[in-house]
Image (spheres, rainbow, N blue to C red):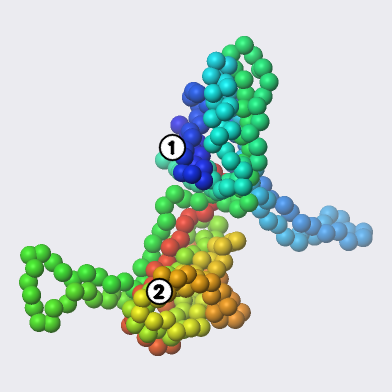
Amino acid sequence: MVKIVCKNQSGDQITFGWFDPLWVSSIDGLGTDYDVYTSKNSGQDGENYNGSDAKLRNIVITLDVKKADYQVQRNRLYSFFQPRAPGVFYYYEGDESRKITYYVEKVEPGGDDNDQVRTLTVSLICPDPKFYALDDQLTQLAVWQGCIRFPLRITDPFVVTKKVNTLIGNVHNPSAVPMGLTVTFRASGTVVNPSLYDVNRHELMQINMTMHAGDVIVITTGDGRKRVKLISGGVTTNINNKMLYPPKWLQACQGDNLYRYNAESGIDSLSVTIKSTQAYWGA
């Protein structure tokens, strides 16, 4: 069974499907749509392939609404879909579920189609055409593990936590769509120039700065979301200029992706996690 859920900027949700009161008559824009660029020389048979890219996604939902309930449902959609604010479109089919961020293009009432129902059309624009899994994948390269167990026994020395170093972690991507990463560096002491190295592709992503105890650096590498933020003393600062030049925005390609973290000094005071979200070209 297919179900569609839209969530707006306020966190409210509305559900569409093959059921009342908002019966899906048709839905377009869930597949793939690419622009292919070619060039042609004089006298050439055919053309040369220059490249291709995915277009923005336009999801158009046509709904059948019973005439007796039409005005209520029309005004409900007008109130729910607001301009200039992002929402999230969720698509459920069988055991698969995916999501995509949208902006509202229009809500269009239809005419008198028959004696029983009238139509409403909802058009959503998705600047990022990729669908994403609902849950994130978390890879921990170095974390602090609690050592307190109950019943409590006091020993000398009394160890509250210990650091577990993995150094190298694997981010698996079963899809052909590269996954952007959210890399988080946390310092429990002084750390100089923390970095993450792509073992497979020999690329280094390094932040040229000194971290102090309590500092957090968050790097996001997804398309349209490439940025570096420092959180220190409760204040968030953009530090894109601190990335080693030329910048390498590491992403997880299809298959296994091995990453190793490092620092010029203070590596024992550095904890690293990598968050990724599976991406798809279609629903």
Q: Residue at x 48, y 33 (%)?
A: 15
Residue farthest to the top?
115
Q: Position of residue 51 (x, y in %)?
A: 72, 60
Numbered mark located on residue 233 in the image: 2
Q: Residue at x 59, y 61 (%)?
A: 223
Mark 2 is surrounded, within 10 Å at the Cα level, by few (under 14), some (14 to 19) or many (20 or more) other residues, namely: few
Q: Nearer the viewer, mark 1 or mark 2?
A: 2
Numbered mark located on residue 94 in the image: 1
Q: Position of residue 146 (x, y in %)?
A: 22, 69
Numbered mark located on residue 26 in the image: none
Asked whether 20 or 251 is in front, the reply is 20
For residue 193, side relative to residue 103 (left or right): left
Residue farthest to the bottom?
265
Q: Position of residue 118 (x, y in %)?
A: 62, 20
Q: Is residue 20 above or below residue 254?
A: above
For residue 119, side relative to residue 95 (left or right): right
For the N terminus, give its image quadrant: top left
Q: Mark 1: which secondary structure? A: loop
Q: Mark 2: which secondary structure? A: loop
Mark 1: amino acid: Gly
Q: Is residue 59 above or below residue 47?
A: above
Mark 2: amino acid: Gly
Q: Is residue 166 above or below residue 62?
A: below
Total number of numbered discs in the rendering: 2
Q: CA distance from mark 1 to mark 2?
A: 46 Å
